[in-house]
DNA sequence: CCCCTAAGTATCTTTTTGTATACTATACCA
DNA sequence: TGGTATAGTATACAAAAAGATACTTAGGGG
C-alpha cells in the first residue's frame, strides 16, 4: 500500500500501542510468554487493578492478546499473545531500537549541558 | 541495548509519536519536505491553530523538527525534519506496514460478519 | 465464623488532551 | 482608511485517560 499522509495507516498501529502500560504488557507477553493477571500486576508496580484490566481488555478487543479463564476459586486468568499480536513485534522492535539510541542521545545532551 | 520490559525504550518513541496529528505531520514533512505553517494547516482540515502550534512545538522541543522564522510581514515560518527526526522513519515505516495489513484484516473481518 | 486469595467492578477525583472562539501585530494593497 | 494575510496567543470549555479507594465473589484453612 502506498505510504502517503492522506493514507495514514500509522494511526492504526499507534491506536493499539497507545496507553501508558500497553507496550510494557506486550513486551512481557512477547518475551516471557503466558502470564497471569497477578504476575503482570507484580511486574508493574504502580499500575492499578482497574488500569491493568482496562489495558488488557482493550488489547483483547483488538485480538492482540488472548484471555483464558479457569473456572476455579480463587480465580485464575491467563493472558498470552495471539498470532496476530505477534505480528506487532517488528513495530515494537523498531520502536525499541529507536528508543535505545534516543536514550543514549539524551544522556549525551545532558552531558553537554553539564560541561558547558 | 537489551530488549526487556524492564528496560522499555519503546515508550520513548511512543511518547514522541503520540498526539492526534503528529504522525500525519511527520509523514508530510518526511515525504514532501519543508512546509509552512499555513500549508500544513490546509493539509489537515479539522485541526485548530492551537493544536497545530502545540504539536509542532512539542516536536520541535524533541528536536524532531526544525522551525525557521522569517522576519517579514505577514509572518512566514517554515518547518522541516531534522536529521534526528528522519531517524524515526524506520519506526513510521514499520507502523505503516503493519497498519496496511491491519486495514486489510479489518475489511476481511467485516466481510465475515456480513456473510454469516 | 472469619479471613485470605485472585481477578475483577463501581465510583469518584484529577490530569491530560483536544475543541471553539476571539484577539493580536503589521506590512501591503486598493 | 479599512480590509487582507500569516502565525500565532489567550481564554474557556468538553472529553478522554489515568489514578485512588472501596467493594465483590466463593472456596479453603484455621
Image: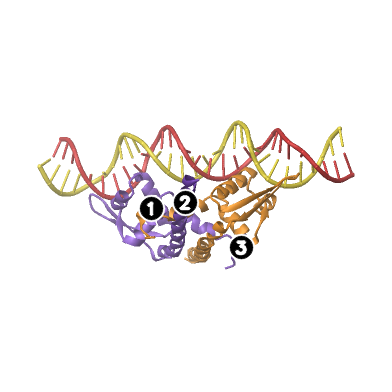
Chain colours: A purple, B orange, C red, D yellow
How far, Cα to Cα, is label 1 from label 2? 31 Å
Residues flagged by tags 3 and 2 on a common chain: yes
Quadrant for residue A93, please give it. bottom left
The quarter in which the N terminus of chain A is drawn is: bottom right
Say the numbered circle drawn on residue A56.
1
| Residue B9 vertical position relative to residue C20 in the rendered view, above or below | below
Q: Chain of mark 1?
A: A
Using the image as rendered, state which of residue D27 and residue A101 is in the foreground. Answer: A101
Residue at the spot of label 3: A4
Using the image as rendered, state which of residue A101 and residue D10 is in the foreground. Answer: A101
Percent across and percent down for residue A64 are 41, 60
Q: Chain of mark 2?
A: A
Mark 2 lies on a secondary structure that is helix
How far, Cα to Cα, is label 3 from label 2? 30 Å
Dot 3 and dot 2 residues touching (CB under 8 Å): no
Q: Mark 3 or 2 closer to N-term?
A: 3
Mark 3 lies on a secondary structure that is loop
Q: Could you tell me which residue is drawn at 58 percent across and 48 percent down?
A: B55
| Residue A97 vertical position relative to residue D21 in the rendered view, above or below | below
Amino acid at each position: 500500500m502506498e505510504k502517503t499522509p492522506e493514507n495514514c495507516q500509522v494511526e492504526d498501529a499507534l491506536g493499539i500501542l497507545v496507553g501508558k502500560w500497553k507496550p510494557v504488557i506486550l513486551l512481557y507477553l512477547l518475551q516471557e510468554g503466558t502470564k497471569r493477571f497477578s504476575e503482570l500486576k507484580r511486574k508493574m508496580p504502580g499500575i492499578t487493578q482497574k488500569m491493568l484490566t482496562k489495558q488488557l481488555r482493550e488489547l483483547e478487543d483488538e485480538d492482540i492478546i488472548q484471555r483464558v479463564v479457569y473456572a476455579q476459586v480463587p480465580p485464575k486468568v491467563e493472558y498470552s499473545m495471539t498470532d496476530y499480536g505477534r505480528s506487532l513485534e517488528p513495530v515494537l522492535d523498531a520502536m525499541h531500537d529507536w528508543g535505545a539510541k534516543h536514550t543514549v542521545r539524551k544522556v549525551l545532551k545532558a552531558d553537554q549541558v553539564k560541561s558547558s
